[in-house]
Amino acid sequence: MSAPIPGIVTNGVVVPSSPLPEGATVRILLSWIAKHPDRFGGDACVRDTRITVWGLVAYRRVGLSDADIAQTAQGLTQADLEAAWAYAAANESEIAEAEIAEAIRANDIAVAAADEV
């Protein structure tokens, strides 16, 4: 995958912030990533699923290949994963914050379960 060229969305059209090289192919990836307040507190998810970008990044961090991730998160395509990787690369701090928040939530659940025993 080639390096992304920054751009802005104006009236639903992506406008590159610099001229494209002659013969360049434009491929919009980030349109697959959506944030909805009713899904994981607004965390970035792939398409209209409940599959979070930070969750996919976590899979990759523990060594799963794209093929393994696509099999684990059934229904995802290679294009979905490419969109997730592009989003994660462009939003590193957001992804890190989401991973930390999830770790805290998981810890709170574990503590609550231990208190019930």
Image (spheres, grey):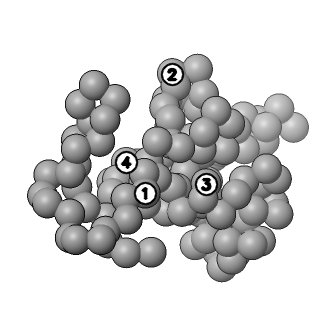
Q: Residue at x 54, y 62 (%)?
A: 82
SS at mark 4? Answer: helix
* Cα distance between the residues tagged 4 and 1: 23 Å
SS at mark 2? Answer: loop
Q: Please, is residue 27 above or below residue 110 in the view?
A: below
Label 1 sits on what residue type?
Arg
Counting the numbered discs, the total is 4
| Mark 3 or 1, nearer chain start | 1
Mark 4 residue crowding within 10 angstroms, few (<14) / some (14–19) / many (20+): some
Label 2 sits on what residue type?
Pro
Q: Tags 4 and 2 in contact by the CB under 8 Å rule? A: no
SS at mark 3? Answer: helix
> In the rendered view of the protein, which quadrant contains the N terminus?
bottom left
For discs 4 and 1, the disc positioned in front in the rendered view: 1
**In the drawing, what numbered circle is on residue 80?**
3
The residue beneath circle 2 is 37
Label 4 sits on what residue type?
Glu
The residue beneath circle 4 is 94
| Residue 15 drawn at (x, y percent) | 22, 44
| Mark 4 or 1, nearer chain start | 1
